[in-house]
Amino acid sequence: MSLSMRLFAIMILYLMPATALPDSPPSDMKCPVLEATDSQARQSLMHYICFYSAGPGDPAHDAVRPDELPDGLAWTPAMGHDLVFSHTNSVYWVHLNVKNSGPAQDLWYLKLNYPLLDEVSFWQSGNGQYDRLKTGDQYPFKSRGIDYRYFLLPVTLAPGESRAITLRIRSSGALNVPLSFETPEQVIAQSNHLTLTHGLFYGALLVFAVFNILLFFSSGTVPYFYNAFYMAAMGLFMFSMGGFANQYFWPDSAGFANTSIPLALALCALSMTLFGRSFLEVEKQTVAENVLKALAWLCVGFLIFTVILPYNKTILLNTVLALTVISSLFFIAIVRWRQGYQPAMWYVLAWLIMLIGGLVYALAAFGYLADFLARESLMQVAVGGQVILLNYAMVQRWRLLNEKLLAVEHNARTDLEFKVHERTAQLRNTMRELEQANRQLATLSLNDALTGLHNRRHMDNILPELCAESRRTGQPFTLALIDADHFKVVNDTWGHSFGDTCLQLIAEILTGHVKRPRDIAIRFGGEEFALLLPGTDVEGALKVCQEILHEAATTSLTAPDGADASITLSAGVAALNYGEGQSDLFARADEALYQAKAGGRNRVIVSETIPAD
């Protein structure tokens, strides 16, 4: 058996014992007299009630006073059953005989516990008195005489006094006549009990609605707004059905008292549809979404019809609409639950409760079930349970969304960490490549590309440091400038390519004789070279230069034309004097080189060294 069939069977079994249509007893029975002082008799009031249903065309239908009723009217005893009638055009007359056999005068109230009646007239007759109270939803609320949502008729009886009470009841909707005969203490006690119950119910609805609207404004999540809208609409509907709206909101607007009920019901249906569509996250372009869209527009249309059509039609249409919306949302939620949407489970339970409670309440409101007060309490319990489950479902939905957000955040963080690691590795590789390039660039910027020796830039950088170190430590520092003799003749005779070969030979000779780690060989011009010799005095520098010149002069090269060629070198040597700067040192070495050139070349000239004081 499917879930829907099981639900239908449960509701049928639940509703069958509650049906309260009176039996069909003999119509010639007279109404018994209720002893007002007997509490058990008062509790069995419906055994003392007689009623008469006057349909259109019946003389009693047009009668407006008890004395206008036809003689010999066939009153029907209620036989203990509540008077509950579905939609009808009949006028109902209700009769009760009551007597006070007590020793003192006392006060009782005949209470009609159903607020939604268009017209209710009370008559009391006895001992020459004839009182009338005419009230109902079609009259201002103050016409009831007592500021109470139900209809109260005060009955004061002297000792031994009897009274005949007659009611004329007419309504365009269903007709419930739940009567009770109570003492003032009982009326107050029950009123206090109901005030507490209704206060808790409507207070909880208000708190949940305000809480959801605050969540909407703080988070911008639309389902919170629709949930608040639904609870406000449901609260207004229950407030109107319970008679509170007529009592507190529009007591002087008799015409709107009835209209407010189907209007609030249509608002409930609209808010339920909007909330269900947003909460269940129904996918677009699906049958479920199309159904919910159609229901939403249908609710809007019914809202318009509510202010146009009469109450007896709109209340039926809007009730069917609300039950249709509840059923549709219930089955759509089941589908979403089966699709793996976990919050839908709580939504299904919420609407299951609402479906049962709403159906029972609708049957009671339309006169198919007795004891409207019990059905109203059941509806409040159903709405309360539904509100709690819906808000719990909202919490579960938020938790699910939060888990998805955390998962997305975790995946994003993992992906970001991977990308950062990847980018870091790429950056390290790039930095290594850049470092290698910088080293190569530094090498190219500080070394001569042809000979591999350091260049003039390196000499300009290192010479001031070596001079400063020599002055600071007192260690000698010698600079030797070496120049190839008649090098222009070599280039002009055999070309620059052979000249480059000669320069490379000179660089090899210099490198071969500059053996200490700190000694530096430099090419700082075309055929001009230099030796930076820290920690070496003039004699040591002179010896090195002589060896270099000797090797150069004794090394022969084969020229491009096959001839033997050789080159000679000239050198100028200068040691750093005390207090001397690098410019003066270089100038003295250059002057010594000039002297070597002028003195015949292929020789070394040492600049004069000034002894320290």
Image: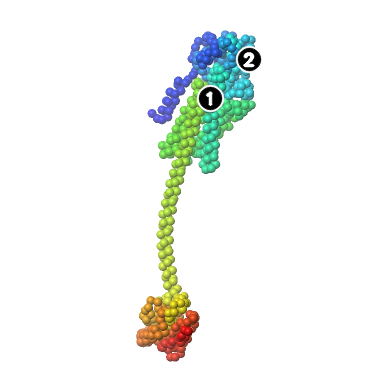
Q: Can residue 244 be seen?
A: yes
The relative height of residue 395 versus residue 68 in the rendered view (above or below) is below
Residue 271 visible within the image: no
Element under disc 1? helix
What amino acid type is highlighted by mark number 2? Asp
The CA span between labels 2 and 1 is 31 Å
Above or below residue 394? Residue 4 is above
Residue placed under numbered mark 1 in the picture = 193
Q: For this view, does 337 lie left or right of residue 257?
A: left
Reading the image, the residue beneath label 2 is: 131
Q: Provide the secondary structure element on which disc 2 rests.
A: strand
Three-letter amino acid code at the position of disc 1: His
Residue lying at 52% horizontally and 15% vertically, measured from the top left: 39
* Label 2 neighbour load within 10 Å: few <14, some 14-19, many 20+: few
Q: Nearer the viewer, residue 91 or 220?
A: 220
Quadrant in the rendering for residue 99: top right
Judge left or right: residue 52 versus residue 345.
right
Q: Nearer the viewer, residue 494 or 15?
A: 15
Q: Residue 338's image quarter?
A: top left
Examine the image and state in which quarter residue 100 appears: top right
